[in-house]
Amino acid sequence: ALDARCVRTLKETQRSWFEHRACHYSAREARADFIAAELALTVRARHAPGPCVVMTIGLPEPGSGREGDDARVMRRRGSVDAGMATKMGFWVNAMANAGAFECETRTYVDERAVETLSATLKDLGHDNSIVEKLWNDRRVSRQLDEEFEQIAKTSPKAKLTVLINDAKRSRSQFARFKKGLASGKVSTIIWRREITSKAQRKALLGEVKLVAQYGYSVYLAGASADADGKATPTAYLRVDHGAWDDIFATPNSGIELTIVAVARDNKFKTLLDQTFGLCPVKTSVLNFNEPKGHSCHCDSDRFTDEMADSKCSLQSRLGLGTSTYNWFSSLLSGRTDTDAAGVSELEEALGGKIDGDERKLARR
């Protein structure tokens, strides 16, 4: 768990950083999720080589930009519309750049994309890639645990990286992944979320708490793109064990967050804590956080190329968000039926209220 003496300093530093650089935490602008996957898989290959599986759920929103050549090829190859083809083209390139196809891949997508995406991966020489229909996450059957058990049977020695590209997947998805979380075989989980209500923010906090309960450290992934569109990682913000701040999940900011959960004994966690954290920490043999030196020192100046830009601030993002009516409506109601169901299932999995005392969690 985080050192309690440093949490306050960490929270204040991270809050200020996020307020002024919120755009760096939108996956649509700099594909922070795939950059996180690339970092995780690079560390795995260097420090823990061996069998690996990359499990991906859904297709991501690629952000702004016209249809690329890969998307046009897919449209000619299969009966998919322009939007689906663009998502698939973006996904294939992003996965290749992340080095994901060096592992076995299990991909679950919209039924309309299965045939075309399977053929594309085969033509590209990715023979160890399986594409299947994405399940309906409102039904009890075929959840993450069931898919995990199938992978564990066919690849019993493999370490898994789970990449959930669809930001609209069920808020209860991790409540149905307890076997996988407890297995010690899932090294990294990366998922997207966009927050449009207080209930969704509460559900995200529940997701963070639940995966932390199974021994994961949890971060918001940052990435920024230069004038040529080249994206690189920037500061990662710790959000578990008391480091959470509601500002990270401000409703209707238009920011699609990337959340990264890393097992405590994973060298990827060491990289994030020492290289990409605003308050760098050293780690013990068990990879728990300890204060650096005798004080909790934060050094945001290490990211010298990440100058604050008023257009990147959270305040500016809120100005670009959805209508005042929708924002005010969600503020008053604070929930939808779908969110309420997800929150209820998360609370049941946590054994208590999501917004309960985090100190109890930190002692586990």
Image: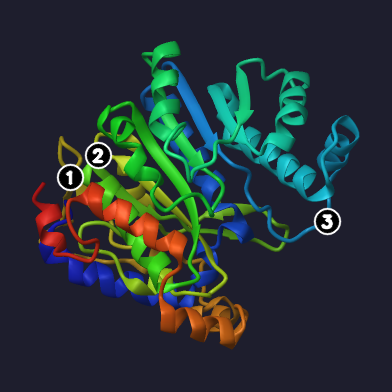
Q: Earlier in the sequence, mark 1 or mark 3?
A: 3
Residue 299 picture quarter: bottom left
Looking at the rendered image, the disc whose residue lies closer to the viewer, 1 or 3, is 3
Which numbered disc, 3 or 2, marks the residue that appears first in the sequence? 3
- Asked if the residue at tag 1 contacts the one at tag 2, i.e. Cβ–Cβ closer than 8 Å, the answer is yes
Amino acid under label 3? Arg
Q: Nearer the viewer, residue 330 or 7?
A: 330
The foreground one among 252 and 176 is: 176
Work out how far the residue at label 3 is from the one at label 2, CA to CA, in angstroms: 40 Å
Q: Is residue 271 left or right of residue 53?
A: left
Q: Earlier in the sequence, mark 2 or mark 1?
A: 2
Q: Which mark is residue 66?
A: 3
Answer with the quarter of the image where residue 340 lies: bottom left
The label number, if any, that marks residue 288 in the structure image: 1
| Res. 26 mark | none
Q: Is residue 88 above or below residue 152?
A: below
- The amino acid pointed to by label 1 is Phe
Q: Residue at x 67, y 20 (%)?
A: 126
| Disc 2 secondary structure class | loop
Secondary-structure class at tag 3: loop
Q: Position of residue 216 (x, y in %)?
A: 27, 43
The answer to which of 343 and 18 lies nearer the viewer is 343
Coordinates of residue 186 in the picture (x, y in percent): 35, 31
Q: In the rendered image, which residue does mark 2 sit on?
A: 264
Q: Would residue 107 be found to the left or right of residue 197 on screen? A: right
122 horizontally vs 231: left or right = right
Residue at left offset 55%, top offset 69%: 23
